[in-house]
Image (cartoon, rainbow, N blue to C red):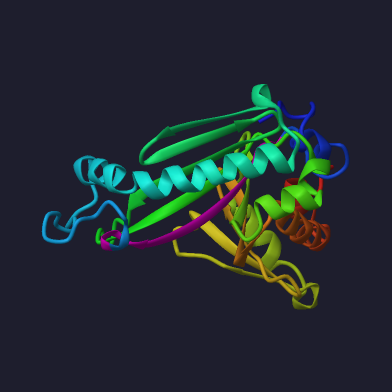
Amino acid sequence: MAPAGGHGLLGDFMASDLPSSIVAGISFIGRSGGAVKALNGFKKGHHTLPDAANATTNAFLGKICAGELTAETEEKFQRVRTGLGYKRKDVSLSVAPPNAVLTGRDFTWELGYALEESNPARYVVTYLLRDLQSADLAQTDAFAEIFAGMFGEISFALKKGARVEAIIDAIEALDPDQGLNVTYPSDCQECTIDVEGVEAHVRCTAATIDLVFPRAGSPRDLMAAFAEVRGAFAVSPVLAGLVVGP
C-alpha cells in the first residue's frame, strides 16, 4: 500500500476523508468456498476427506485444488490484461497452490485456498485486493466488471490502533435518533456498529475498522457504502477521528 498521505488509493482518501496519522492501508476482502470432494483433483475411492485442518491437510488441498486455482487466476490475468490495457511488463501471475498472486501495475490481487477449521471437509477461498493505486481506477466500469461480486469487506488498517471501549462509549452517549447502534462482547475486544440506512456492518477492533456487507460487490460498490458510513460517523468527534479526519 502506498505510504499514508502519498500517492495511491490511500492518498486519494487522505486528501479529504481519512486521517493519515491513523489509517495505514486499505484492502478489499472476499470469500467463497465449497466441498473438498467436489474439487476436480479429488479422486473418490483413492482420496479420503480431511478430518482436521493443519499443514499436512492444507498441502493436500493445494494439490487437489490446482486445476481450479490455475484456471481462475489465468482467466483473471487475461481479463486484467485486456480490460485494463496492460502490457506484458504491467502484470504478472505467480501460482503456487494453494495460493496465487496477480501483481498489476496499479494493484495486487491474491487468492488462497484453505480448509475450514470447523469443517475440514469443506474449503474456503479468500480473495484479497491490496495496494490499489488509484480511486479513479476503482471507479471505472472496466475495473468494476473485472472484480464484480467478489468482495464482501473493506478493511482499514490502523497505524496506532484504536480503543474499542472509547468507540463503544461514544456511540452509547449519542441520542438514539442519530441512527447508530453498537453491540459488543463482555471483553470489548471488538464491537459492531450498525448505521441506519446502510446495509454494511462496521466492525471495529484495536487494529482495524472493517465494513462487512451482506452481499459481495466490486471495490466501487464498497467505496460508495463507505462514503455513507463516513457521513454518519461525523456526528461524534471520536468516530469522526477514525474515518472522517480532523
Q: Residue at x 11, y 60 (%)?
A: 45
Q: Is residue 133 visible?
A: yes
Where does the image place residue 105, in percent across and percent down from the top left? Answer: 69, 28
The front one of 205 and 163 is 205
Q: Residue at x 79, y 78 (%)?
A: 177
The front one of 51 and 149 is 149
Image quadrant of residue 198? bottom right
Outermost residue toward the bottom in this view? 177
The N terminus: image quadrant: top right
Asked if 37 appears above or below 205 in the picture, the reply is below
* Residues shaded magenta: 22-37
Q: Residue at x 51, y 43 (%)?
A: 73
The C terminus: image quadrant: top right
Q: Is residue 37 left or right of residue 154?
A: left
Asked if 205 appears above or below 175 in the picture, the reply is above
Where does the image place residue 204, in percent across and percent down from the top left? Answer: 59, 54
Q: Residue at x 42, y 46 (%)?
A: 69
The front one of 16 and 117 is 117
Where does the image place residue 111, in percent across and percent down from the top left? Answer: 48, 44
Where does the image place residue 241, in percent across and percent down from the top left? Answer: 76, 46
Image quadrant of residue 10? top right
Outermost residue toward the left in this view? 45
Q: Is residue 178 left or right of residue 195?
A: right
Q: Is residue 72 left or right of residue 221?
A: left
Outermost residue toward the top in this view? 89
Q: Is residue 31 left or right of residue 44?
A: right
Q: Is residue 119 visible?
A: no
Asked if residue 197 lies in the magenta stretch, the reply is no
Image quadrant of residue 6? top right
